[in-house]
Image: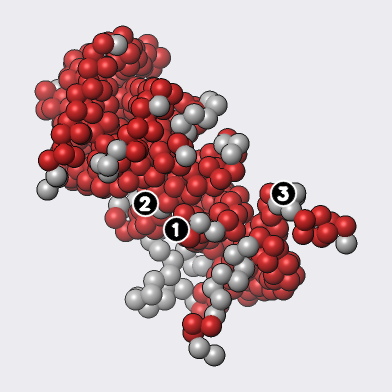
Amino acid sequence: MKMDHINWFQWSSPQALYPFAGRLISWVSVLSLLCIAAGLYLGFFVAPTDFQQGDSYRIIFVHVPAAWMSMFLYIVMAGWAALGLGLKTRPSFMMAQAIAPTGALFTFLALFTGAFWGKPTWGSWWVWDARLTSELILLFQYAGVILLHASIDDLRRADRASAVLALVGVVNVPIIYFSVRWWNTLHQGASISMTAAPKMATTMLAAMGIMALGFWLYSAAVALMRVRCIILERERHASWVQTERAS
Amino acid sequence: MMPAGMLATVQGLVQRDLLLAWRRRADAATTLLFFVIVASLFPLGVGPEPAVLRTIAPGVLWIAALLSCLLSLGRLFSVDYQDGTLEQMILTPQPLTALVLGKIGAHWIVSGLPVVVLSPLIGLQFGLSGDAILILSLSLLLGTPTLSLVGAIGAALTLGIRGSNLLSALLVLPLFMPILIFGAGAVASSESGMGAEGHLSLLGACFILGVTFAPIATAAALRIAVE
């Protein structure tokens, strides 16, 4: 098949995206459940106990993947926003809107599990350290994007204004990611590095990778479910939605 | 290099905004007074312990500057939006980013510069040393233009929405945080003997980043708001 025969805009109409998302959801959610179950089992029962931090380190298997997803989803959301602004495709904005709450959820989860990890290791629930603060800023940014979208009644304007805001906030993502390297802070360095030899046991790495995959699949499933709701809500006067509802 | 026509238009816009601000001096005075009052609340709330005041002074002044900037942001585009001037600005052949930069510059001269000028006085009230006051004013001089630049994005995004001032504050405050950290950190690190150069350089970097990208984002937001 030649490249120029691929129709890149095949799912760029809400009507085409709706059934496609519906077909994807069941597969993606089953896979995500399997991955999360396997990751949790590996992390909590198979992975060895850390010689310094004991068993309290095991929250890493939720904390680190959640923190990754919080940053990754922001980039994905901003990517959809940019696509929407550039190509004027409505489903792109819908995807950005659908991802935002999940991103905010993972940011909150990263902060929350971080607090539970911080208490036994640092002795306090919260410190005003560079990475924690910038992750908190990320949570506020998600909130800003969601709030701005909710405050504008004109959907077209709401979509585009929150897209601009999402793009502006991308500045923060590299700051969070590199904060532990740029500032010498309390938060430990990156758990996994592409260049250096792994600092942890292979089972730990595997558990973390599988959890991250599971969280990613979960985000995809939830975002697709949400985008279906958004499509139904926005296209409720379209004739295909009427027939969809009737059937 | 800017073409001559564009430069003249931007210059005219800045002059117009400054003249408007001068005709309505009470607005700018309100912002400045707000800055002074917020800064004076802290000694009353925290207690007049000189050592404590000296440590919190940079943060207090920076937060007061940040809040007074937020307070004045509502006026940045809303008047032009209501009377239709903004639409005319968008329709001019000059690039909107340049015009926006001019408006932001005028906004800083009216609301940011007075805060910078007044900051040594408040610094004295908090018992800061001469060196610390110098660093503090320098950090405000470098940082407040960035506040105006970033704030303009929020003001443009929330133009004409109900409760726009509060919403704009919510959108913009997270983006202000790095500037606050570097600005207030400059004084603290110079006091601890590490020198303020690092923080001031980062503030300068934020400013360059802001001056490059904020007008583009603001112009895009204005187009979205007006159409």
Residues marked 3 and 1, same chain: yes
Q: Is residue A153 left or right of residue A192?
A: right
> Within 10 angstroms of label 2, few (less than 14), some, or many (20 or more) residues?
few
Kind of residue at disc 1: Gly
Q: Which one is earlier in the sequence, the residue at label 3 or at label 2?
A: 2
User: Which of the numbered marks, if any, corresponds to residue A233?
Assistant: 3
Q: Is residue B52 left or right of residue B4?
A: right
Helix, strand or loop at label 2? It is loop
Which chain is home to disc 3? A
The CA span between labels 3 and 2 is 32 Å
* Residue of label 1: A86
**Residue lying at the far right of the rendered structure:** A247
Would residue B107 be seen by someone viewing this image from the given angle?
yes
Labels 3 & 1 near each other (Cβ < 8 A): no
**Residue B74, quarter of the rendered image:** top left
Write the residue at 59% across / 58% down. Answer: A91
Q: Is residue A129 left or right of residue A98?
A: left
**Residue B82, quarter of the rendered image:** top left
Write the residue at 71% across / 52% down. Answer: A235
Which chain is home to disc 1? A
Viewer-side residue, B150 vs A88: A88
Write the residue at 48% across / 43% down. Answer: A161
Please tell me whether residue A233 is drawn above or below residue B118 in the rendered image: below
